[in-house]
Image (spheres, rainbow, N blue to C red):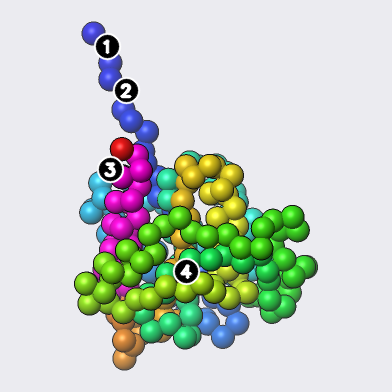
Amino acid sequence: MAVMKKAPPRLVLLTGFGPFPGVERNASGLLVRKLAAAAKQRFEEYRFETAILATHWETGPAALAAVQTSRNHLLALHFGVSRQARGFVIETVGRNERRDAEDAAGCRPQSSCISENGPARLFTPLPATGIVARLTVAGLAATTSDDAGGYLCNAIFYQSLTHSLAQNGASRAGFIHIPADLGEPGAELSMDDGVRGGLEILAACLDQLGRVDT
């Protein structure tokens, strides 16, 4: 009698950041841990992994590269904070540029670009407008953006999109900015709102992957 082999786990990577100048409490790092725990209950056929990346020009991207090359993730969702965000900001474009700004270690980027021979822009394959629609129905403020900035958020996004491109679409990448004060007393969005919105984002992305798989 043939033994049925168990299907390999369908892996999803969730990343946030540690502190950086001006942001001692990074809500993105707090959110992804809570979101992963909630996602395991809702999406039982997937396995969720988290990584908190140092807000450092060299070690942050290097840590992400190490995780992505050691695993076959179907989806990588990256979260970062923005002082301008009033809700969920779904980034659609990663740019091959780095702003001359100090990271958490007081270092500045060694060059103004992320990849010397890389394209100027890379676009997320995730359903950004569909994500915004789901969040809006859920009563959560959301918008799309075509400018993830020139700091570590954009650097991580561009690198992850580059990895996705190298995998011929087998791995998909997205970046979401959340309010820097998420979960703080008096903030417009609570941490529970963050988790609830994160689950809606995951649902939209996994639904798209399901349609592609079939």
97 left or right, relative to 180 = right
Q: Does residue 160 appear anywhere in the picture?
A: no
The answer to which of marks 1 and 4 sits earlier in the sequence is: 1
The chief SS type of the magenta part is helix
In this view, the residue farthest toward the right is 110
Closer to the chain start, of discs 2 and 4, is: 2
Whether residue 56 is in magenta: the answer is no
Residue 2's disc is 1
Q: Could you classify mark 2 by the number of other residues whose Cα lies within 10 Å: few (under 14), some (14-19), or many (20 or more)?
A: few
For the residues labelled 3 and 1, the Cα–Cα distance comes to 23 Å
Q: Distance between the Cα atoms at labels 1 and 2?
A: 9 Å
Pointer 4 residue: 91
| Amino acid carrying mark 2 in the image | Lys
Which residue is drawn at the image coordinates 35% and 43% (left, top)?
A: 212
**Residue highlighted by disc 2:** 5
Quarter of the image with the C terminus is top left
Q: Identify residue type, mark 3.
A: Glu
- Disc 4, SS: strand
Q: Earlier in the sequence, mark 3 or mark 1?
A: 1
Instruction: Report, in whole angstroms, how far the alpha carbon at label 1 lies from the one at label 4.
Output: 47 Å
* Image point (35%, 55%), residue name: 205
Q: Which mark is residue 113?
A: none
Q: Which disc is residue 45 wearing?
A: 3
- Left or right side of 150 for 1: left
User: Looking at the rendering, which quadrant does residue 199 occupy?
Assistant: bottom left
Q: Tell me which segment is drawn in magenta.
A: 192-213
Point out the image quarter for the N terminus: top left
Q: Closer to the camera: disc 1 or disc 4?
A: 4
Amino acid type, callout 1: Ala
Q: Are marks 1 and 4 in contact (CB under 8 Å)?
A: no
Q: CA gap, disc 2 to disc 4?
A: 38 Å
- Residue 37: x and y in percent read 30, 58
